[in-house]
Image (tube, rainbow, N blue to C red):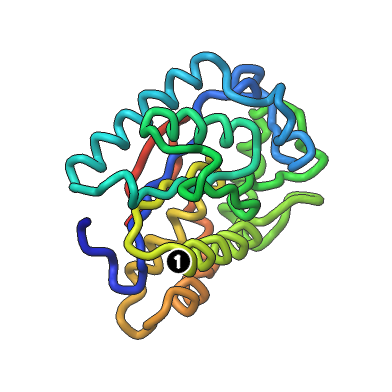
Amino acid sequence: MAETTSFLSNRYWVLRHGKSIPNERGIIVSSMENGTRPEYQLAPEGVSQAQLAGQLFQKVLEENNIPIDNVRICYSPFSRTTHTAQVVASVLNIQFEGAQCKVMENLRERFFGPSYELLSHDKYHDIWALDGKDPLTRPEGGESVDDVACRLAEAIATMESQFQGCAILVVSHGDTLQILQTILNAALDAGSSYSDLASRIQAVRTPPVLSQHRKFSLQTAELRAII
């Protein structure tokens, strides 16, 4: 396997879930209560997208000489992400209920708050405008960019403590993965003055960094290497 970044024990790829039923309906589904309902899983097009993403990831693994045994799939508990992870695991011939797949609540969708839940996804633009002004401010009853960054830092720490020398596929959501990429890329650029992951992420969890998360947006079922 290719050498990992010095402050990380693993290599990371992100995968946004395939096109979901909420995507088709054009609604925001961001609470745990709604997000885990089976009626909000992948749309048929999203299943096809997830299969293609799995095939692409398989090709990446082969090109990097990474054995399937070294792969870990960590995914959000929402129906659309669980469904995506299941499809990818099937393509890779990985047992979904086995040790190589791990559901992580900290990878869940950003909760946009009750005033946005189940409403038109056009309202995302209101939230992103707020994020650009102040990523520490929460939408009413929801999570700020920094709130998500905080729980993602915990998720990364968990993955780093449980896995070493693995290729980790993080299956999650648009905003969540934008924020994850933001903090990991900034941590990578933080310089050698911070020797460990926690101190690097803490140092870069600042408004000028966090407000830029939209630069890392992903299409449905888009696969991307982070580090």
Q: Is residue 131 left or right of residue 65?
A: right
Between 157 and 221, the one nearer to me in the picture: 157
Which structural element holds mark 1?
Answer: helix
The quarter holding residue 186 reads: bottom left
> What amino acid is labelled 1 in the image?
Glu
Q: Position of residue 141 (x, y in %)?
A: 81, 51
Which of the image's four quarters has the C terminus? bottom left
Q: Residue at x 76, y 34 (%)?
A: 34
Q: Residue at x 47, y 29 (%)?
A: 220
Q: Residue furthest top?
A: 44
Q: Residue at x 47, y 79 (%)?
A: 199
Is residue 9 depicted above or below 169 in this figure?
below
Q: Position of residue 92 (x, y in %)?
A: 36, 34
Between 6 and 113, the one nearer to me in the picture: 6
Q: Position of residue 132 (x, y in %)?
A: 56, 53
Which of the image's four quarters has the N terminus? bottom left
User: Is the residue marked by circle 1 packed among few (<14), some (14-19), or many (20+) residues within 10 Å?
Assistant: some
Is residue 72 depicted above or below 39 in this figure?
below
Residue 177 seen anywhere in this rendered image of the structure: no
The residue that mark 1 highlights is: 160
Residue 54 seen anywhere in this rendered image of the structure: yes
Is residue 9 depicted above or below 110 in this figure?
below
Q: Residue at x 32, y 62 (%)?
A: 165
